[in-house]
Image (cartoon, helix red, strand yellow):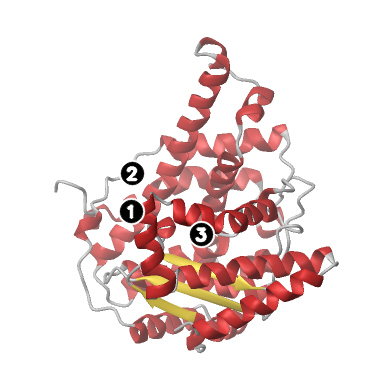
Amino acid sequence: MWKIEEIKQKQEYVRERLNHCMDPKEKEKLELSLITYNELLSNSGTLRYTRIPNLLDKLTKDNFSNKKEKDLARLEVELFFGDEAYISDEYLNFLLQLCDRVSEREVPELDETLFVPMAVTKESLIELSKKFYASLQDEEILELANKVLNDESSMNFSHIARRSRSDCKGLTLNDYIFDKSYINVTSQNNIFDYQVFNHEVMHGIDFYMRKKVPSENYYGFHEVPTYTIDYLFLDYLEENGLDPNQVQMLRCQKDNYLHLLATLTKTQIRSQLIREYGVKNSKNPSMDQIRKILTVELKKQLLDIQAGIMAYGLKEQIRENKKIGISHLKQFMRNTIPKDQTPDFSYIGLSNNELLKYSEQIRNYSMQSQDHISVKGK
């Protein structure tokens, strides 16, 4: 479990260093770590830092947290989105194409109450994740996975999260000063815990592979390695004897997430255009019109859709040639993505044309094993 007193000491140490820091690059890492310590304490599941603040938020309609954490929240926005990355008209049009294709596909309606309760322990999560990363047959990835999995102080398991994180079942937070990745799982006591835990371990591997900071890296693609691992892990679960129907529900869950994100993004863009230009003038909007209504959140969503398709493409590469696919995944994790130019992933076999192809193929991902699908009402 996380060592709360140690985290508090690090928090005070970083605050003190910030008071005297004049180097912008060092300051960025200090500020990122300060945000991490605050989130670690808030999501620790402890009475002092999670349960009582949750109660106070409930009594004050979130005014307690809004007042207490507004400065750190503002700092986080400035760090990640203060210097926005470049999006050309051509690239924006490409992102909208991907969004359209993903939103058009049909996905089965998933009833998550059909996840079967099961006894999930910390030990079982760690053991299965170790076996999975060993199965990838890559020494570097396994070494970095074990750096997380063999350090009990880097992992936290709780049955309660902060109200602001109630929909977030897993969380990874990185300490740039003391070189440590922390993961948290809010337990559901079903098969989803295994996927969430393994997903967060991959965030840790990504951090240790190369410590990317927002000022130097195009924000929006941090889920590519973890989404890729999700695809591989679900196959691994089924191959190793877990209930195929439950595994298929996880596949449907992945499909639903990307489809609903694309549908929501299209709806939000359409609504903003109508609000800004009226129904008639928003039917065939120009790139300038779309750019004008494009919020930071909408950009994040469009990039997350591309990240999902990239992960599917890497999964397919690994399925076709494990050595080459894993090599491409590691290349992606080692490289930063320049913020002043259009992202180009052709060096790992994911050109825009390839991504358009995968955006068509991904439609059939969870439908490939229809006999296992649990659909609401059936």
From this view, report whether residue 118 is shown above or below residue 139.
Answer: above
| Farthest residue, direction top | 280
Q: For the residues labelled 1 and 2, say whether their Cβ atoms are less than 8 Å apart.
A: yes
Q: Nearer the viewer, mark 3 or mark 2?
A: 2
Q: Quadrant of the N terminus?
A: bottom left
Mark closest to the chain's N terminus, 3 or 2: 2
Residue 143 visible in the shown view: yes
Q: Is 278 placed above or below 271 here?
A: above
Identify residue type, mark 1.
Cys
Residue 134 x %, y %: 49, 83
Relative image position of residue 221 (x, y in whole percent): 61, 55
Residue found at x 65% / y 70%: 33
Q: Residues within 10 Å of mark 3 (few under 14, many from 20)?
A: some
Q: Earlier in the sequence, mark 1 or mark 3?
A: 1
**Which residue in the structure is indicated by mark 2?**
107
- Give the left or right position of residue 192, taking residue 23 as reference: left
- The residue at 81%/71% (across/down) is 20
Amino acid type, label 2: Val
Residue 148 in the image, given as x and y percentages of width and height: 53, 82
CA gap, disc 1 to disc 3?
18 Å
- Check disc 1: other Cα within 10 Å, few if <14, some if 14-19, many if 20+: many
Viewer-closest of 293 and 343: 293
Image point 61% across, 82% down: which residue?
9
Q: Amino acid at mark 3?
A: Glu
Residue assigned mark 1: 252
Which of the 4 quarters of the picture holds residue 103? top left
**Residue on which disc 3 sits:** 316
Where residue 326 sits, quadrant-wise, is bottom right
Q: Secondary structure at mark 2?
A: loop
**Kind of element beneath mark 1:** helix
Q: Secondary structure at mark 3?
A: helix
> Which label's residue is closer to the chain start, 1 or 2?
2
